[in-house]
Amino acid sequence: MENLRDDVLEMIARIKVSKRDAVLASRGRGKETLDDLLYSKQSIPPSKFKDELTEFHAHCTERKEERTMINVQLVPPGNIVHMVKTGFNASRCPCGGSRGSLYTAQWIEASDLSEITISAHLLDDHIPLNVLTELEQIAAEFGLSSPFTLNEESSSEQSRD
């Protein structure tokens, strides 16, 4: 999570345009390219935010060096199902927007979540309504129906296994 935080803060420091324009562009509502929106990592101009970010990183490094306690890694318990984006489908967009996503469920290990990649669609992908819609679709593909109890047919097949 530390890397995610650092990536997000760096991305904010690199923004050339207003945050509003950046959010609109990330949702596909602008004609800007990534180069139009962000400074390169090497050419971030001086700013109060950049100075504070540099101080924050120095403080974090100092705190890491001062800590003597064991680094305890927290992981989600149980089995983890990751919803992997496999494509786009306008007819499935629950928000009424111009684009919907198709997902495939796959089992992953907790260690697979040690790094999180930031994408332009990160916020859209995690809107609760979008997640709920996709979970319902995946549940239906596994023979579950609302209120998500096993269907008679699926239940009898499962008891034979």
Image (cartoon, rainbow, N blue to C red):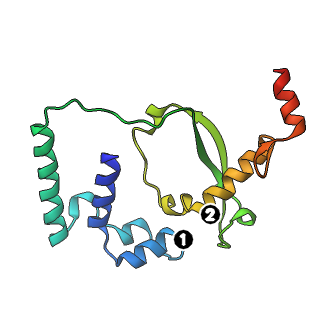
Q: Tell me what residue is drawn at x 28 percent, y 53 percent.
A: 6
Q: Are marks 2 and 1 in contact (CB under 8 Å)?
A: no
User: Where is residue 158 drawn, in percent x and y?
Assistant: 81, 27
In this rendering, position of residue 77 left or right of residue 61: right
The residue labelled by disc 2 is 129
- Report helix, strand or loop for mark 1: loop
User: Where is residue 144 drawn, in percent x and y?
Assistant: 79, 44
Q: Given the image, on which type of amino acid does mark 2 rest?
A: Leu
Q: Tell me what residue is drawn at x 32 percent, y 61 percent.
A: 11
Q: Residues within 10 Å of mark 1 (few under 14, many from 20)?
A: some
- Report helix, strand or loop for mark 2: helix
Residue closer to the observer: 54 or 76 = 76
Q: Tell me what residue is drawn at x 86 percent, y 28 percent.
A: 157
Residue closer to the observer: 89 or 67 = 67
Which numbered disc, 2 or 1, marks the residue that appears first in the sequence? 1
The residue labelled by disc 1 is 28
Location of residue 8 by image quarter: bottom left
Location of residue 18 by image quarter: bottom left
Q: Is residue 68 above or below residue 56?
A: above
Eye-nearest disc, 2 or 1: 2
Q: Given the image, on which type of amino acid does mark 1 rest?
A: Gly
In this rendering, position of residue 143 left or right of residue 32: right
Where is the C terminus found, in terms of image quarters? Answer: top right
Q: Is residue 131 above or below residue 161?
A: below
User: Where is residue 96 drawn, in percent x and y?
Assistant: 68, 73
Q: Residues within 10 Å of mark 2 (few under 14, many from 20)?
A: few
Q: Kindly identify which numbered label has been placed on residue 104.
A: none
Q: CA distance from mark 2 to mark 1?
A: 19 Å
